[in-house]
Image (cartoon, grey):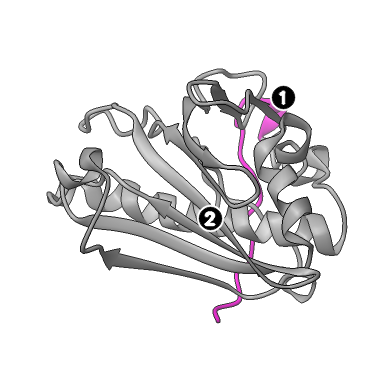
Amino acid sequence: MKSSHALPLAATPASTDRPVRSSASTATATPAAAAAVSPRVLRAEAVVDAPAAEVWRAWSTSSGASAFLAPRVNIDLRIGGVFEVFFDPQDASKSSRGIVLALVPGQMISFGWHLPPLYPQLPHGVMPVLIALRPTGPARTVVAIAHFGWGAAPCWDEPYTHMLRGWSDVLGRLQHRFAVGPIDWAAEMASGPDRREFTLKERAVTPV
């Protein structure tokens, strides 16, 4: 199974990854941008075997994020700074160009996210994503993702499912980055003839 969506699926042997937990939830309090649409929040969570400071660098620097999030990432770590993710550097349409919305150094970063253009029926405004880190030991960190801004209508269900799997895959790549090493993007990409079709290999996720 392959996907050419803006948050592609990827794969790595499950034996090198720690469990990843993802879920749908209804929050009692959400940012205003999300509450105006619906209380539905997409959540994904994983434990990473690395100090919180190292995991923070992975999420807050261009070089750190390029080791697991996407082949090319541009991050300007300040409120209003860019947070740009390019899943296929040869095709700008497979990207999310947001800005940093909020941050607590070493603990939390929030940025804007754009759904891929294959969902033309949806409004393509900015959706807030929040990444929170919680150290549970000197070399162990819980990473929690919350993606806000989802509508309640049925037309939102497919992109919601897509992003739920996508963020789980991102966490799987983050685990792999610290357990094995930075993602080899040339090996990770599964392309069609002459690179006309861009995808990432699916990543097997072991439930908690």
Q: How far from the left and from the top, in percent, is residue 179?
A: 83, 64
The kind of secondary structure element at disc 2 is: strand
Give the residue drawn at x 37%, y 39%: 128
Residue 28 vertical position relative to residue 173 in the rendered view, above or below: below
Task: Provide the residue span drawn in magenta.
Answer: 192-208
Main secondary structure along the magenta-highlighted residues: loop
Q: Which residue is mark 1?
A: 194
Structural crowding at the residue carrying mark 2, measured as other residues with C-alpha within 10 Å and reported as few (<14), some (14–19) or many (≥20) = some
Q: Is residue 95 visible?
A: yes
Give the residue at mark 2: 132
Quadrant of res 119: top left
Residue 199 relative to residue 127: left or right: right
38 relative position to 134: left or right: left
| Residue 27 % position (x, y) | 25, 63
- Whole-percent x and y of residue 26? 23, 65
Q: Is residue 207 magenta?
A: yes
Q: On the rendered structure, is 196 left or right of 100?
A: right
Query: Toward which corner of the image does residue 19 lie, by quadrant?
Result: bottom right
In the rendered structure, does residue 133 fall within the stretch colored magenta? no
Up-down: is 106 above or below 101?
below
